[in-house]
Amino acid sequence: MHDVIIAGGGPTGTMLASELRLHDIDVLLLERDTEPMRMVRSLGLHMRSIEIMAMRGLLDRFLEHGQTYPLGGTFAGISKPLPQPLESRHAHILGIPQPTTDRLLAERAVELGAELRRGAEVVALNQDDDGVTVELADGRCERAAYVVGCDGGRSTVRRLLGIDFTGDPPRQEWLLVEAELEATEEDIADAMAAGRPLGLMFGPSPHEAGVHRFVMTTDAPVEDRSVAPTFEEFVARLRATVGGDLGVHSPRSVSRFGDGTRLAERYRDGRVLLAGDAAHVHAPIGGQGLNLGIADAVNLGWKLAATLHGSAPAGLLDTYEAERRPAADDVLAATRAQSELVWPNGDVLAVRRLLADLMDIDEVNLRLTEMTTGTGVRYDCGDGHALLGKRMPDLELEDGWLYDRMHRGRGLLVDPVGLGVGAWAARVEVVPVSTSSTNGGVGQVVSTGSTNGVSILVRPDGHVAWVGDDRAGLEASLECWFGPA
């Protein structure tokens, strides 16, 4: 019997597997597809995901295969200069194709000891008081204490649980195709000029030489989204759009996606939980889908591990849904708004003009940028200091950076006061910094208020659980998040 079975070997599932393995949880990853996905759905990582990779010691691996680009304020395609202050060492976008992200995260999960089994499709679930039995398409069964569905927008796990996936159906649909071309550079330039006003974007694939990536709007969303599009359907659409087929051939992948917005009614049913696209889908504008799933995994991993180890305080696992479902709801609302703002009509243009003016105000630009980059998420960790519930910036210490101390997935006490953690030392590491360290140390966190003379308790997911200078307050927070001493 396994501790956790994860259905779905995409970035959410593999990130969650790694988080659990940091706490010695036995993990079985079941992936329906026999081979890794080759299609480039996501083109990069936002700032919060880059910070998470730094927190887990993975950033150098990603930087080796990606390209950093300057980050600016952007919302619904309205670009503005980078807002200040945007407390982060990693205020940029990392351009990296999703197959590379998938590979790096899968390699990390296996490296840490997770078992990844491909060609394993979940078809049935049966849970009882002691665990969950998973039936696979080949007739085999596996059993675990908990199961997490990370199996995408058409999640089998969610369907088997009978969890409603409510929201708005797609109004627009795109074909996403990767294929080779025989066209000349002149033909390509003409096609780009003709196709842009009609909803065609294409260019060289970011991960395979000689291959082009096409994104093309269709006339209307299909009624049955489970039916895959064909290459012939794409070629016919391409001819109707630009007057020719550009000699397109040898397709690598053909799929469709839409701007539908849906959110799972709940994230948990007994011993089964949902994460990533299995819990939420939205329009691709802003590129937040993969990043939202990674944040789900980092929030859930340490809580589920503590529950399995028996050290979790009462209700800790329930805070996963309490924190991540509202965060997803905010992203869904933001992408809905952006989708409305890109429809070309007079009313929308008037609103875009007004919003563009408002984004010249630093506070507005900062708020919208934090929405898109995932850095504005704040959890309910009580009242008091402005930093509570927010993610902790990566501060420069006398001997390195704060995120370097988070590779093991444990809590941190940033402790210039000298409080210590006592009996919680096995779960929380102490970082005895001084307020005079470089980058302002703990003495200067620009947009969140002064932290002089206080210690900061940071959860394993990088969010601040407590700020203060009294032993009683610290111990109460340690027990709240990390269990009894």
Image (tube, helix red, strand yellow):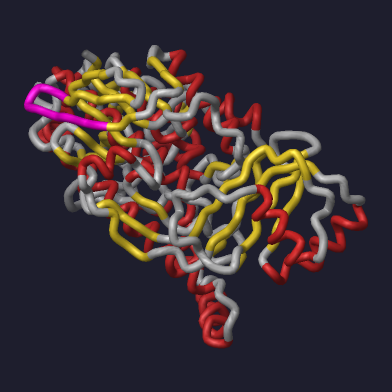
Q: Where's residue 43, x and y in %?
A: 60, 44
Quarter of the figure with residue 210 = top right
Quarter of the figure with residue 405 = top left
Q: Nearer the viewer, residue 79 or 182?
A: 182
Q: Nearer the viewer, residue 476 or 141?
A: 141
The range drawn in magenta is: 124-131
- Please tell me whether residue 444 is drawn above or below residue 314 in the rendered image: below
Asked whether, in this view, residue 301 is left or right of residue 110, the answer is: left
* Count of number-bearing discs: 0
Residue at image x 14%, y 27%? 312
Q: Where's residue 216, x and y in %?
A: 65, 59
Is 126 magenta? The answer is yes
Image quarter in which the C terminus is found: top left
Asked whether, in this view, residue 61 is left or right of residue 161, the answer is: right
- Please tell me whether residue 413 is drawn above or below residue 388 in the rendered image: above
Image quarter in which the N terminus is found: top left
Asked whether, in this view, residue 413 is left or right of residue 382, the answer is: right
Quarter of the figure with residue 115 = top left
Q: Where's residue 64, x and y in %?
A: 65, 27
- Please tell me whether residue 53 is drawn above or below residue 229 in the rendered image: above
Q: Where's residue 109, x and y in %?
A: 43, 20
Residue at image x 76%, y 61%? 239
Q: Is residue 158 visible?
A: yes
Residue at image x 60%, y 54%? 175
Q: Is residue 306 visible?
A: no
